[in-house]
Structures are given as structure tokens and as C-alpha cells.
Image (cartoon, helix red, strand yellow):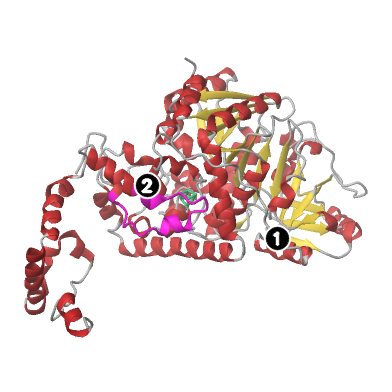
Amino acid sequence: MSSKQHILNSLKKVAVEPVPMPEINIVPRTEDLVGQFETNLKACAGILRREGGLEALQSFVDDLMKEGKQIISFIDGIESNREIPATPHELRDIDFAIIPGDWGVAENGAIWVCCDKLGHRITPFICENLILTIEESKIVPNMHEVSDKVSLESGNLGVYIAGPSKTADIEQALVVGAHGACSLNVYLL
Amino acid sequence: MSTTKGSQVHAHKADIFCKDETKVDWHSKALWFVREKRDRAAGSIPEWEEIRELGSQVKTHALSHLGHYLEEFEKNCLANGIQVHWARDGEEHNQIAHSILAKHKVKKLVKSKSMLTEECHMNPYLEKRGIEVIDTDLGERIIQLAEQPPSHIVLPAIHMKKEEVGELFAEKIGSEKGASDPTYLTRAARAHLREHFLTADAAMTGVNMAVASTGSIVVCTNEGNADMGVNLPKLQLHSMGIDKIVPNMDGASVLLRMLARNATGQPITTYSSFYRGPQHDGEMHVIIVDRGRTDMLKDKIIGESLKCIRCGGCLNTCPVYRRSGGHSYNYTIPGPIGIAVGAQDDDTNSIPWACTLCGSCTSVCPTKVPLDQIIFRHRRLKAESGQLPYGKSSYMPLVGKFMASETMLNCSMGVARTALRILPGSLMKPFSGAWGKYRELPAGASSSFEAWYKKNRSN
Ligand code: SF4
């Protein structure tokens, strides 16, 4: 008998009392979604840029390019100095990646990002610093509200990103910048 | 008491941990601090208790229909281009992992946290066969370099002080001697591990959830090590216990709302990644493992331990775990949940007693795993199969008879009260056994509670 068949057979004798899949009817908190989002993003060590939108972002990028920083952008209209390379490994020296976020979650500051339109899935993780954008109308109250909205096509990778990478594995001291990006700025559009 | 496997009873191992009193104090307080952060995070969500109940129901529903959902998961994975393998035990899991890696001539594997591969002892299995395995979670890398097992399921190196980590890193990864600043040490590890990410031939991760309706797996990390690992090489492997199944995205959202809040008090982990297929030109494998889980599901009470989402909350709150450390449980998973899922393999038959039955674990658990009931059930099973630890099987029947006799009990309590009042503590201490080791004896009361009650309250 295959291991699969063996496991499935053993599962015919489960003693745990069956219950139906519950209905999820959580009342969302809809007041000041941007404010909630900002507070929670801050708790995750990310920064929300409320003012100036894409123009502010472009002038920030211009300054960075003058300093010689390596920048890759996936946002129409934002000019940068790097293209998608042939292999993911060549992204190792990217200083800033600028990527559109699809949905924002007010209750925890997370932003849903589809990785397959980025050429290489590694982009939001390998960059030294990450910049995401989010449209104000795409911020929803909680995870229940977003779960049927996020698109995750067959074969794709989608990720909720909440802040820069971090760790507290040495004596519980919080250190921002573990293996992924060391900072996260979110531009509100 | 030693046994054939070289494991020792919990109390003995706890004794070793308790030798350094300042460190134990620090350990206990650090974990309690995490527990307090968890309370604040839970308290900030008015519907917390409601989602706990939903979480419990989602998991119970999935477990009671597990065969159905596993098949649905497999079917959808295949449609997404994900290859699925089934393993009955650790050995079979390791064989499958190795055969995939060998086929691709993998020399270096980067791994992110997976308690399951720890359970299966996969690292030594692969290393023996010439594959270098690099643990990439910072805490896991620390203990891998120190050649120790994890002592906590979320904070694997919580038993080590920063000076010890500094010394270890200086020796193993060439950081500055004498450095102990956590930021400096983390940066040193970042640079060291980045080289490994960039030169790995394959990556492996654990699975936080497996979504049946979409055929996708969810991996949560704060460090980003899982995604850094998986998205550079072309080959990705993911190991999951059969219990990781959730029916759909709604179910996954309920659990995601609680996981990080209950683990560390964060609103959500930094990265919650949904892999619904391999990267372009890549290969993605999921290994579904039983390893005793179907047996556990045959017991109505013990089966509920598979509702666990491995947040670590029950460890942080446990008064025994905080003061005995994660290496005292003879099992990869320590603390209340470690007792729940590991007691049947404990050859010292002492682990189910590493618990005061206070129930704190049960009340913090996000999916309402009835940990205290499960631990009690393990005691009962050990007793029924004649496997009580030595002391308990010899004196407990006597204690039972003694407590049941009113005259005997009253009379001896009277003697004890007088003795506590008039004899010096040093003479009385030996009678208190292990209990008195770290405690002072109480002052003897002048009369019994019964006598006091009769005099003051009975009419
Ligand atoms: S038993 Fe509950 S509290 Fe303990 S690790 Fe599992 S989910 Fe968390």
C-alpha cells in the first residue's frame, strides 16, 4: 500500500468530534482606515508617507540616484537606474526596490504584493531597502475583508509584507534588518 | 534516572538548567515579557475571543475531515505545478527529501525554520550523505553552530546570553572577539548567511498552513529567511505535517490574525508568503508527513493537540517551562505543547509531570488546544500502562489511602503543625523533600482550618 493510501486509511478512524466549517462574520472597524493602517505599520517598524504621492517618491528617488544608489522600479512613471537582470542573483546589490502593493490591511499594517510580475520573485526580499505604494481606496479593515480580494493566480507567489525584516533572536533585543529589507517606506496614493 | 536512550527525567534536567540562578531568572522574565506583549496585542482586538473560537472551529473542522482536505490539497497542488509526496514517518520523509536533492546534485541546502525536520532529524541524515545544510533563521543558525537542539519553538536560542552568542560567532563566523551587541551580531550573521543564500542549490522550509482550496502553502517569518532561501535557487522543498491543512483562504486569515499576536505580540509576521507554484523554470515539492499524527487523532483528547499552530504562547506562559528551560523535556518541542505531542515517546515517563495543571497554557492558546486536559490524559495513560515514574508508583497509592482516612490525616496534621512551630527549620527541612529545596517551610498555624471554621463560622 502506498504511504498516501496508508495515511488516508488511518484517517478514517479520527476520534475528534466533527464540527462544520464556521461562518466568519466579524464586524469590521471601518473608522479612519488610513490612521489605523499607519499606527500598525509603525508598530511593524514601517513608515507611511501620506503626502506628495508619486511626485514626492520621484524626487526622493532622484536624490538617491545622485548619491549613486542602485534602484529598480516597477511603478509606471517612476524613473530608476536598473533593469530586471537575467538572474535573480544579480539583484544582490539593489539598494532600493519600488513595488506596487495591491491591498493594505488596516488592522496590522500588512500589504499584499504579487511577486510574479517582478521578473524575479526575490526582488522585495533581496533589496537593501523596500518602497511600496498603496492606493488609499485599497486599504481594508482586516484580514477577513482582504482574503477573498487578494489575487493569487495558479503558479504564483503572493506575500503580505508588514515592515522591514527583523529579529529578536539574540536576547530578545529587536534588531531591524535581518535577512530581507532593512527599511520599508510606504507611499500613499 | 538515566535510560537506554540517554534521556533523563525532567526534574534532573531542570536541575542542570537551574544551576545558574541569574540565568534562570533572566529566562523566566524574558519569556514573561513576551507573554505580556501577547496580552496587549490580544487585548487590542475587541473580537479576540471570537476569533479564538473561530480558530478552534476551523482547525477542528479540518482535522475531522482531514482525508478529504488532504486529497483536495494534493489535487490543487498538482494543478498548480507543485509535486506532492507522502511520508508515513521521519525516515521516509528524509529519504524523499534526499532523493529529490540527490537527483538535482544539490551540495548546499538552505533551510528555514521547520520543527518537523527537527522531529525527523533530517539535518544529520542529509549531512551524512554529503549535503551541507545551513539553517538560516538567526536563532536556528546560532544553535546549529553551537551544536545544540532548539530550546523554544519560536525563539530557538532563548537559553543563550548575548555574550555566549558573541563568543560563538567570533569562533565560527569571524566576528569581532568580545563583541556582544545584538545589532552588531545580527549584521554579522546577515552578511554570513547572505553568501550562503547566494550560493545555495536548493531551499527547504516548514509550512505554517496548507490551503486546500487553492493548493498553496503559507510560510511566515520575520527575518525573511524563508523567502530569501526559496527564491534564489531553482529548487524548493516544503515539509508539512498532515495537521497543517486549512480548508480555504478565510480559514487561513483567521489563523494569521492570531499567530504573531500570540507568539510575540506583533500584529502580524513581517512576511506571510503564499506559494501557489514554483518560480518560472523552477521545481516545487511538498512532502506531507504523518509521523504519529494519525495515531494521535484516534484519541479524542490527544487528537486536539493537532489544532496547534506552533505560536509558542503556551511555552511563554508556563511556570514550569520558564524555570526549567527547553532542554529539559527530552523532545524537540518543549513546554506544554511538547508534552502534549511528545509524551508518548518519552522513555523516562516523567514529562507529563513537568506541569502544575494550572491551565494558563490552555487559556492563552489561540486555537483552544485543551493542553491541561491532554497532559492529564497522558498521566492517566502512563498509569494505565504501568509506566508511572518510580516515586509516583511506589508512594502514591499510600498517599491515597492516607488522605482518605480522616483520623489518620487529622492526627498527623496536628503533629506537623506542632513540629513546624517548635522544631528548628533545619531539622524539619529534610521531610519536605524536593519541594523544600528552593523554599522556606511555612510557619505552623496554631489550629487546623476545621477547628477554626467550627469556632468562627459554623453557625
Ligand atoms: S498549543 Fe496553542 S499556545 Fe501552544 S504553541 Fe500550539 S497554538 Fe500556541
In space, the residues marked 1 and 2 are separated at their CA atoms by 38 Å
Instruction: Give coordinates of residue A177: x percent, y percent.
Output: 64, 53
Bin the neighbour count of mark 2 within 10 Å (Cα to Cα): few under 14, some 14-19, many 20 and up: many
Q: In this view, does B32 lie to the left or right of A142?
A: left
* Tally of marks: 2
> Do residues under tags 1 and 2 come within 8 Å of each other at their CB atoms?
no
Q: Is mark 2 within 8 Å of ligand 1?
A: no
Image quarter in which the N terminus of chain B is found: top left
Image quarter in which the C terminus of chain B is found: bottom left
Depth check, front residue: A155 or A120: A155
Residue farthest top in this picture: A1
Residue occupied by mark 2? B374
Examine the rendered structure and indicate whether residue B360 appears above or below residue B98. below
What's the chain of the residue with tag 2?
A: B
Q: Do we see residue B444 in this rendering?
A: no
Q: Which residue is drawn at 18% across and 59% down?
A: B434
Is residue B371 found inside the magenta-colored segment of the image?
yes
Q: Which amino acid does label 2 sit on?
A: Ile
Is residue B348 found inside the magenta-colored segment of the image?
no
What's the chain of the residue with tag 1?
A: A
- Kindly report which numbered mark, 1 or 2, lies closer to the viewer in this rendering: 2
* Magenta range: B353-375
Instruction: Give coordinates of residue A127: x percent, y percent.
Output: 73, 46
Instruction: Give coordinates of residue A24: x percent, y percent.
Output: 66, 50
Q: Which amino acid does label 1 sit on?
A: Leu
Bin the neighbour count of mark 1 within 10 Å (Cα to Cα): few under 14, some 14-19, many 20 and up: many
Badge number at residue A41: 1
**Residue B436 location, quadrant:** bottom left
Examine the rendered structure and indicate whether residue B115 appears above or below residue A162. above
Examine the rendered structure and indicate whether residue B88 appears above or below residue B256. above
Instruction: Give coordinates of residue B80: x percent, y percent.
Output: 70, 27
Q: Residue at x 67, y 28 (%)?
A: B76
